[in-house]
Amino acid sequence: MLPVLFILSEEPIQIAQTVFKAGEGAEAQFLGVVRGMEDNKVISGIDYSVYLPMAEKMLQDLVECGQREHGPHRVFIQHRLGFVAAEQPSIVIRVRTKHSAESFELCHWYLKEIKTRVPIWKKPVFAESPL
């Protein structure tokens, strides 16, 4: 199995330089940012919370499942925790594979699985109305 990495932290997302290994020919990256609106209301950001032991276990299981079901690939996932201001990145997923189509498909698969399976909760922080 190829190396796998995921981070759940309050640290800002840093965009790293791509370094390909032998046999890799593609990288797909998804960068999700906090929108400034939630339910048609202006927000200043989102407060993300998590039950860390369970979320880390589920992410590890998810990555192992991805390796089993979709073949060897490298993946890096970072999801911010705590308050993330509007227009700031809250998640990045990078998938490196041999071919571009599988990188795109796996990136989408990881995003869908994280949103539906990993216990990360979001609470919008609504902007204050002007007086």
Image (tube, rainbow, N blue to C red):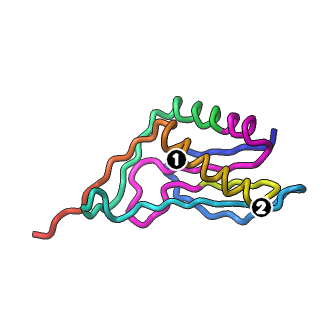
Amino acid on which the number 1 mark rests in the picture: Ser
Please state, as top left, top right, bottom left or bottom right, where the C terminus lies in the image.
bottom left
State the residue position of label 1.
9
Q: What range of the chain is rendered magenta?
A: 63-92
Q: Please indicate whether residue 114 sits to the left or right of residue 72 in the image.
A: left
Number of marks present in the image shown: 2
Report how far apart the C-alphas of labels 2 and 1 lie in the structure.
27 Å
**Image quadrant occupied by the N terminus:** top right
Q: Residue 27: x and y, percent?
A: 73, 60
Q: Quadrant of residue 85?
A: bottom left
Other residues around mark 2 within 10 Å, as few (<14) / some (14–19) / many (≥20)? some
Task: Provide the residue designation for mark 2.
Answer: 26
Residue 79 forms part of the magenta stretch = yes
Closest to the observer: 124 or 23? 23
x, y percent for residue 71? 78, 42
> For residue 4, what is the image quadrant?
top right
**Which circle's residue, 2 or 1, is located before the other in the chain?**
1
Residue at image point 50% right, 34% down:
52
